[in-house]
Image: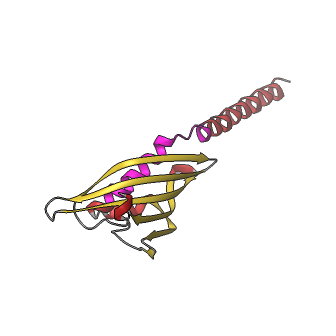
Amino acid sequence: MGAPRGAVLLAAALLSACARHAVTLRAAEAVATPDEVQVVVRLALMLDAAGDRAADTLYTADALIVANARVRLAVPRFAGISSGGRVTIAASSVTLEGRFAWVLMDYRWVNPQQRLAEAGRATFICERRAGAGGWKIVHVHSSQVLPWDR
Protein backbone atom coordinates (compact mmCIF):
# COMPACT_ATOMS: atom_id res chain seq x y z
CA MET A 1 0.00 0.00 0.00
CA GLY A 2 2.95 2.33 0.69
CA ALA A 3 4.46 1.91 -2.79
CA PRO A 4 1.42 3.14 -4.76
CA ARG A 5 1.09 6.17 -2.49
CA GLY A 6 4.78 6.96 -3.03
CA ALA A 7 4.33 6.63 -6.79
CA VAL A 8 1.35 8.99 -6.66
CA LEU A 9 3.34 11.56 -4.67
CA LEU A 10 6.25 11.30 -7.12
CA ALA A 11 3.93 11.74 -10.11
CA ALA A 12 2.28 14.74 -8.45
CA ALA A 13 5.67 16.31 -7.74
CA LEU A 14 6.78 15.80 -11.34
CA LEU A 15 3.56 17.24 -12.75
CA SER A 16 3.76 20.31 -10.52
CA ALA A 17 7.37 20.88 -11.58
CA CYS A 18 6.36 20.67 -15.25
CA ALA A 19 3.42 23.00 -14.70
CA ARG A 20 5.63 25.58 -12.99
CA HIS A 21 8.14 25.37 -15.83
CA ALA A 22 5.46 25.89 -18.50
CA VAL A 23 4.06 28.91 -16.66
CA THR A 24 7.55 30.37 -16.33
CA LEU A 25 8.14 30.06 -20.09
CA ARG A 26 4.84 31.75 -20.93
CA ALA A 27 5.58 34.56 -18.50
CA ALA A 28 9.04 35.09 -20.01
CA GLU A 29 7.56 35.25 -23.51
CA ALA A 30 5.01 37.85 -22.42
CA VAL A 31 7.55 40.35 -21.10
CA ALA A 32 9.07 41.40 -24.42
CA THR A 33 10.01 45.05 -24.25
CA PRO A 34 10.82 47.64 -26.90
CA ASP A 35 14.28 47.99 -25.35
CA GLU A 36 15.17 44.39 -26.24
CA VAL A 37 14.42 45.02 -29.89
CA GLN A 38 16.14 48.43 -29.85
CA VAL A 39 19.37 46.77 -28.74
CA VAL A 40 19.34 44.43 -31.75
CA VAL A 41 18.63 47.08 -34.41
CA ARG A 42 21.05 49.64 -32.92
CA LEU A 43 23.75 46.99 -32.82
CA ALA A 44 23.01 46.07 -36.45
CA LEU A 45 23.61 49.69 -37.51
CA MET A 46 26.76 50.12 -35.40
CA LEU A 47 28.34 46.87 -36.58
CA ASP A 48 27.43 47.67 -40.18
CA ALA A 49 29.25 51.02 -40.02
CA ALA A 50 32.27 49.24 -38.55
CA GLY A 51 32.18 46.57 -41.29
CA ASP A 52 31.98 43.93 -38.55
CA ARG A 53 30.76 40.52 -39.75
CA ALA A 54 29.40 39.81 -36.24
CA ALA A 55 26.30 41.65 -37.49
CA ASP A 56 25.42 38.50 -39.47
CA THR A 57 24.26 36.83 -36.24
CA LEU A 58 21.51 39.44 -35.81
CA TYR A 59 19.66 38.35 -38.97
CA THR A 60 17.72 35.22 -39.86
CA ALA A 61 19.28 33.07 -42.57
CA ASP A 62 16.58 34.15 -45.03
CA ALA A 63 16.43 37.84 -44.05
CA LEU A 64 15.70 40.31 -46.83
CA ILE A 65 17.77 43.49 -46.67
CA VAL A 66 17.01 46.33 -49.07
CA ALA A 67 18.84 49.67 -49.21
CA ASN A 68 17.92 52.38 -51.71
CA ALA A 69 15.83 49.84 -53.67
CA ARG A 70 18.69 47.32 -53.97
CA VAL A 71 19.00 44.01 -52.18
CA ARG A 72 22.11 43.94 -49.99
CA LEU A 73 23.88 40.70 -49.17
CA ALA A 74 26.87 42.05 -47.23
CA VAL A 75 28.10 45.21 -45.50
CA PRO A 76 27.31 47.97 -45.93
CA ARG A 77 23.71 46.88 -45.60
CA PHE A 78 22.16 50.27 -44.88
CA ALA A 79 21.56 53.21 -47.20
CA GLY A 80 24.05 56.02 -46.79
CA ILE A 81 26.55 53.98 -44.76
CA SER A 82 30.03 53.31 -46.12
CA SER A 83 33.02 51.64 -44.54
CA GLY A 84 34.38 53.43 -41.53
CA GLY A 85 32.78 56.27 -39.69
CA ARG A 86 30.15 56.00 -37.00
CA VAL A 87 26.38 55.94 -36.73
CA THR A 88 24.17 57.90 -34.38
CA ILE A 89 20.47 57.30 -33.89
CA ALA A 90 18.31 60.41 -34.26
CA ALA A 91 14.92 58.85 -33.49
CA SER A 92 13.29 55.46 -33.22
CA SER A 93 10.01 53.82 -32.33
CA VAL A 94 9.09 50.21 -31.67
CA THR A 95 5.74 48.50 -32.09
CA LEU A 96 5.36 45.04 -30.55
CA GLU A 97 2.72 42.57 -31.70
CA GLY A 98 3.08 39.03 -30.39
CA ARG A 99 6.40 37.60 -31.50
CA PHE A 100 6.95 40.37 -34.09
CA ALA A 101 8.26 43.92 -33.76
CA TRP A 102 8.41 46.83 -36.20
CA VAL A 103 11.11 49.42 -35.67
CA LEU A 104 11.24 52.77 -37.46
CA MET A 105 14.62 54.45 -37.10
CA ASP A 106 16.26 57.66 -38.32
CA TYR A 107 20.05 57.52 -38.28
CA ARG A 108 23.05 59.56 -39.34
CA TRP A 109 26.36 58.20 -40.58
CA VAL A 110 29.44 60.42 -40.25
CA ASN A 111 33.01 59.88 -41.42
CA PRO A 112 35.04 62.90 -40.19
CA GLN A 113 38.26 61.79 -41.93
CA GLN A 114 36.57 61.87 -45.33
CA ARG A 115 34.28 64.79 -44.41
CA LEU A 116 31.21 62.77 -45.30
CA ALA A 117 27.82 62.60 -43.65
CA GLU A 118 24.56 60.94 -44.69
CA ALA A 119 21.13 60.65 -43.14
CA GLY A 120 19.06 57.52 -43.45
CA ARG A 121 15.75 56.05 -42.43
CA ALA A 122 15.15 52.33 -41.84
CA THR A 123 12.20 50.07 -41.15
CA PHE A 124 13.01 46.79 -39.43
CA ILE A 125 10.79 43.77 -38.95
CA CYS A 126 12.05 41.53 -36.20
CA GLU A 127 10.85 38.16 -34.96
CA ARG A 128 11.34 36.73 -31.51
CA ARG A 129 12.72 33.23 -31.97
CA ALA A 130 12.15 30.46 -29.45
CA GLY A 131 15.03 29.26 -27.36
CA ALA A 132 18.28 31.17 -27.20
CA GLY A 133 17.66 32.85 -30.55
CA GLY A 134 16.03 35.94 -29.07
CA TRP A 135 15.10 38.76 -31.45
CA LYS A 136 16.29 38.40 -35.05
CA ILE A 137 15.94 40.76 -37.99
CA VAL A 138 13.85 39.18 -40.75
CA HIS A 139 13.52 42.23 -43.00
CA VAL A 140 14.97 45.71 -43.16
CA HIS A 141 14.47 48.44 -45.70
CA SER A 142 16.53 51.62 -45.58
CA SER A 143 16.75 54.75 -47.71
CA GLN A 144 18.82 57.87 -47.66
CA VAL A 145 16.89 60.91 -46.60
CA LEU A 146 16.32 63.30 -49.48
CA PRO A 147 18.09 66.67 -49.10
CA TRP A 148 14.84 68.60 -48.72
CA ASP A 149 13.66 66.23 -45.94
CA ARG A 150 16.72 66.68 -43.73
* Of the pair 95 and 74, the residue shown nearer to us: 95
Bounds of the magenta span?
A: 28-47
Name the image quarter holding the C terminus.
bottom left
Camera sees residue 132:
yes
Image: 87 above or below 38: below
* Of the pair 49 and 69, the residue shown nearer to us: 69
Q: Residue furthest bottom?
A: 70
* Of the pair 109 and 139, the residue shown nearer to us: 109
Q: Main secondary structure of the magenta part?
A: helix
Residue in view at x 39 percent, y 59 percent: 149
Residue 27 at x, y percent in the picture: 63, 35
Residue 122 at x, y percent in the picture: 44, 59
Question: What colouring does the structure picture have?
Answer: secondary structure
> Exactly how many numbered labels are in the figure?
0
Image: 142 above or below 29: below
* Of the pair 19 and 97, the residue shown nearer to us: 97
Camera sees residue 134:
no
Please state if 114 lies on the left or on the right of 138 as rendered.
left
Residue in view at x 42 percent, y 71 percent: 68
Q: Residue furthest right?
A: 1
Residue 47 at x, y percent in the picture: 32, 58
Residue 73, quarter of picture:
bottom left
Q: Residue furthest left?
A: 113
Please state if 22 lies on the left or on the right of 64 as rendered.
right
Q: Is residue 44 magenta?
A: yes
Residue in view at x 46 percent, y 41 percent: 35
Q: Is residue 110 magenta?
A: no
Name the image quarter holding the N terminus.
top right
